[in-house]
Amino acid sequence: MNRRLVVAGLLATVAAALVTGAFVLDPAGGGDGGPAERDARMVPAPGSNVKAHGRVVVDGATWYLTSFEDLDGNYCLAEHYPGGGVGTGCASPKELFARSALWAGAGSTQDPGETGRWAKAWVSGRAAPVVERLELTLSDCSRIPVRLDADRVFLHVMSAEQLRRSTLPARLTAFGADGTKVESLAVDLGPSGPWSTPFPSEPQKPCR
Amino acid sequence: MAKALLVAIGAAVALAVAPTASADTLCAATTAFTQNHEFHFLTFTWTYKSYWFLGTPYDAYRYRADGTIAYQKTKLSGGEWTYTNGTTNAWRETAIYENDNALAQYTMRQWAYGGTSCT
């Protein structure tokens, strides 16, 4: 009897492996040479401290960030958008500030049928310990202080009114404790694609 | 022995159904090279999650069928990014645009939620 159960167990294991194949071993069905199923591992590790940051209400809608350590020990920052969308990026502690004092990005969205303009735009990220103050220069050369929280995480969302004036994020500038500039990153929201006109956000003339 | 085989088949089916019932459906995927501010696209499918990776600065996109951008993310230092609109599939095309001239390898994938169809 026990022998039969052992045989059945072995057969079940082999059959399950054959039947499920890629689904069990490769849930994303990848195998295309890219980073091995990283998308499935960009989630909080068991026991990871999921911390909320930068809650802002813009045009009546709430935006916020969460930070956590993922299943591979990377630092992750997730953007939580009104309506339930979530964007997540992760980097190893070694990679985080390897290229820049700002681990940062920008985002934007259009309303359906409105190819000519952005409906929302935002910047977010985390600053290296050397950064004391952060400033966002807009495409009209106006400057907005961007608040860094205790973990040097930041989120700034442009209101619909700002975007109606065709004002877009153009540059993120980081300053050290002594006021010196430690980083300056151009923020170009990028071309909108082959179907519509581009959205250059860099000012036509250099800002003073 | 026949009984053992039946038990084995039953167990295999049970094991097979469980993971596939909850696994997302991969709708489109690519890993290739990009250079000189090129755009690259996946196809339109019923999509709830997209994944991008490029080691150089890039823009990640999800387009609607009318050509508008449902979602755009600029990664100033490159790296990986995912976007999910909760558990709801929407008719989306995932795209990537390299904000650089360097020859670099990118990856994009897009999924339908759970075992739902991409089409």
Image (cartoon, coloured by chain):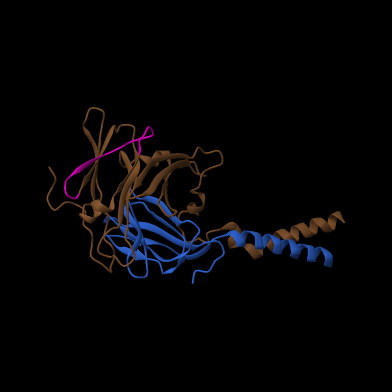
Chain letter for blue? B
- The magenta-colored residue range is A139-153
**Quarter of the image that includes the N terminus of chain A:** bottom right
Q: Position of residue B10 (x, y in %)?
A: 75, 64
Of all residues shown, which one is farthest toward the top?
A178
Looking at the image, which residue is at 36% across and 51% down?
B55
Where A86 falls versus B115 (above or below)?
above
Q: Where is residue A162 in the image (x, y as percent from the top left)?
A: 24, 51
Chain letter for brown? A
Look at the image and say whether residue A133 sits in the magenta stretch: no
Q: Is the magenta stretch mostly helix, strand or loop?
A: loop
Near-viewer residue (A20 or A137): A137
Q: Is residue B115 left or right of residue A6?
A: left
Q: In this view, does A46 lie to the left or right of A191?
A: right
Look at the image and say whether residue A148 sits in the magenta stretch: yes
Of all residues shown, which one is farthest toward the front?
A60
Near-viewer residue (A187 or A163): A163
Where A50 falls versus B25 (above or below)?
above
Q: Quadrant of residue A20?
A: bottom right
Q: Quadrant of residue A131?
A: top left
Looking at the image, which residue is at 84% across and 56% down?
A3
Q: Position of residue A185 (x, y in %)?
A: 25, 45
Looking at the image, which residue is at 61% across and 58% down?
A24
Q: Can residue A104 be seen in this view?
A: no
Where A199 falls versus A135 (above or below)?
below
Q: Is residue A148 left or right of residue B20?
A: left
**Quarter of the image that includes the C terminus of chain A:** top left
Q: Is residue A115 left or right of residue A3?
A: left
Of all residues shown, which one is farthest toward the right?
A1
Q: In which quarter of the image is residue B36?
A: bottom left
Q: Is residue A145 visible?
A: yes
Q: Where is residue A70 in the image (x, y as percent from the top left)?
A: 49, 44
